[in-house]
Image (cartoon, grey):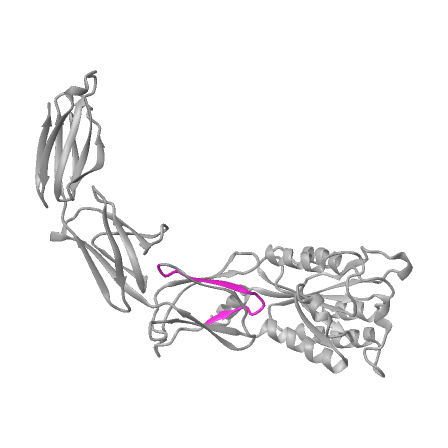
Amino acid sequence: MGNNNRLKAQSTEKKTRFLFMLDCSGSMWDDINKGGRQKIVVAKSILSRLVDSLQHIPNVEMALRVFGTSPKNKYDCKDSHLEVSFFDHNADEMIEKVSRLEPSGTTPIAYSLTQGADDFPNSQGKNIIILLTDGIEECKGDPCAVSQSLQGRGVILRPFIIGLGMSTDYSKYFGCVGTYFNAANENDLKNILSAVVTQALNNTTVQVYLNDINGKPTETNVDMTFYNAKSKTVVYNIYHTLNASGMPDTLKVDPLTHYNLVVQTTPPVYQNDIEFQSSKNNIIKLDAPQGNLNLSINNKSSYTIKCLVRKSGQKEVIYIQDFNSSHKYIVGTYDLEALTLPRTRINKVNVEQSNTTDIQIPQPGKLELEYKRDVVGSIYVIRNKKQEWVINVTGSGSERKELFILQPGSYKVIYRPKYSHNTIETKQLEIKVESGSFNTMSLQ
């Protein structure tokens, strides 16, 4: 039973796929360094040993694409071929293909990357290109644009480019394509290939420190979303947790992707273009101090009233909170607009670290208007000796009455018969609405 469970767990793990892309242009016959072996001989030897070792690792698949095997004088910019496709137990075929390679052609890197995108199976997994070359693009292609597009579409992760006996200056050329390494000699190539594969396979972890106002990682219980920085797609949705030791819990991540992080506090906290160090525990520290805002209605009223919350002095609504509820906000000053009749505005409300700010508004009252005939009219509130419009009345309907929920205060109802042609028939009535009261007014 236990063995079956382990097999089932392994089968659901995502594959790590390595597409080895090998330059076979004519310059690969040159020595890798003064007095060293030829670049192609070194590459074939080390690549074959690596392929042989990878075949024994679970959930790893390999394929081989080669470019530059046509005669140099043909200048064939479509000289790129998938020699061995992705399938199980293909190491022997890859090693045999590698042993027969004879460099002679040109260097169509951009075209090879474009074609390589279709070499990967259309299923979930980590798709990684490892490009071994001793030169730059020779066919007027744009490897940077191709790589960026493939990463943006989520086809591949950031490629690895290994330059064979090239100047370190080429890191600027290949930096936009992927992660560049310069192998100055045979030993360098062996170590770099090993490090690249290890980086792709080993566990990398991250802890997200949500720091309070004192710089301590005490904030928690909030959703965190990691996006692929290139494709903008969601990679991880994790609800932040503190472990048994009171420290942020650890998350396994893929180090070959750059991430954008959104911590779903109110308002959200962001950090973009995050790059993790492979095979290590990485720590992200974000300032996310929070406090509570508690909204209530006097006398524990059951009315449903919503409140628009904005950062002080700004127009954008960051949250809509119900009264008779509590919600966490990033420490700061906020402007509140309760959707009462009329609107209740409370500005410069301070939310402090780990404290609860209580805001209470009066319980509203009810005003029922009864219509003897159809009318047109409006309700106004009197504030600071000024008359402010609140809402229009319908003034018609089969029930001949209309109910309004109004905040305590002094009001006027101004109206006239709907079908009257005389302005002089305008009438106004005054009424005082108190908390919890029920008032009826008849419009003649």
Could you say which is closer to the camera, residue 81 or residue 408?
Answer: 408
Which stretch is magenta?
251-266
In this image, 248 relative to 274: left or right?
left
Q: Residue furthest right?
A: 73
Picture coordinates of residue 77, whole percent (x, y): 81, 56
Foreground pick, 158 / 297: 297
Vertical side of 306 occupied by 413: above or below: above
Instruction: Find out whether residue 258 is within the magenta segment.
Output: yes
Residue at x 10% of width, y 34% of height: 430
Q: Which quadrant of the figure contains the C terminus?
A: top left
Image height check: is 155 above or below 48? above
Q: Examine the image and state in which quarter residue 353 appears.
A: bottom left
Residue 63, above or below 400: below
User: Going by the image, does 421 lie left or right of 274?
Assistant: left
- For residue 308: magenta? no
Front-most of residues 81 and 380: 380
Taking 88 as reference, is 106 left or right?
right
Q: Position of residue 81 (x, y in %)?
A: 78, 59
Q: Residue at x 87, y 65 (%)?
A: 104
Q: Residue at x 56, y 70 (%)?
A: 255
Residue 299 at what x, y percent from top left?
Answer: 11, 52
x and y percentages locating residue 253 in the rendered image:
51, 69
Tell me which corner region of the image, top left, top right, bottom left or bottom right, holds residue 410. top left
Q: How many marks?
A: 0
Residue situated furthest front in the rendering: 385
